């Protein structure tokens, strides 16, 4: 099995950080649909300008929401710009797997 990039959000601003919440990344369900990701799917969150880089999972939220929860909230600040990366595992093949990039 190989791991391939499935989808990427080049830049998105963190709209909130809630430490007193079960850990995750709350992302608008519309954006999740456009990216082809499901609730509970693994996501890597990388700071654009800082050193923060974490792995968590995604849960659906309201339009425009990109909120870090639980322990994930301690690695970033509201207003910080991040990249979101989603990966998939697949058997190697000759097919070109084209990721969704927004």
Image: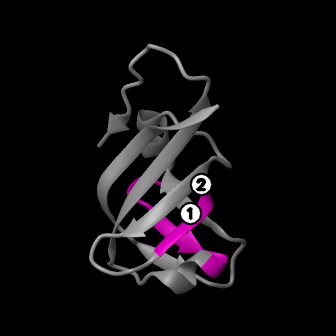
Q: How many marks overall?
A: 2
Which residue bears the numbered disc 2?
A: 58
Image point (43%, 14%), residue name: 95
Q: Position of residue 44 (x, y in %)?
A: 51, 59
Q: Residues within 10 Å of mark 2 (few under 14, many from 20)?
A: many
Residue 60 falls inside the magenta stretch: yes
Residue 60 appears in the rendering: no
Q: Position of residue 90 (x, y in %)?
A: 60, 27
| Residues tagged 1 and 2 counted as in contact (Cβ below 8 A) | yes
Which residue bears the numbered disc 1?
A: 25
- Residue 46's place in the image compared with 20, above or below, is above
Residue 31 lies in quadrant = top left
Magenta region, residue range: 53-71
Image point (47%, 64%), residue name: 45
Q: Of 60 and 25, which appears nearest the observer?
A: 25
Residue 64 lies in quadrant = bottom left
- Residue 59's place in the image compared with 7, above or below, is below
- Residue 79's place in the image compared with 27, above or below, is below
Tag 2 secondary structure = strand
Decide whether the magenta segment is chiefly helix, strand or loop.
strand
Q: CA distance from mark 1 to mark 2?
A: 5 Å
Image point (36%, 34%), residue name: 100
């Amino acid at each position: 099995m190989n791991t391939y990039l499935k989808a990427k959000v080049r830049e998105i601003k963190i709209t909130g950080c809630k430490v007193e919440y079960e850990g995750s990344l709350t992302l608008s369900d519309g954006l999740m649909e456009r990216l082809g990701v499901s609730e509970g799917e693994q996501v890597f969150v990388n700071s654009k300008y800082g050193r923060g880089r974490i792995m968590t999972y995604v849960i659906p939220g309201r339009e425009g929401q990109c909120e870090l929860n639980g322990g994930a909230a301690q690695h970033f600040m509201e207003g910080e710009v991040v990249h979101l990366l989603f990966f998939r595992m697949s058997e190697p093949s000759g097919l070109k797997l084209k990721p969704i990039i927004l």
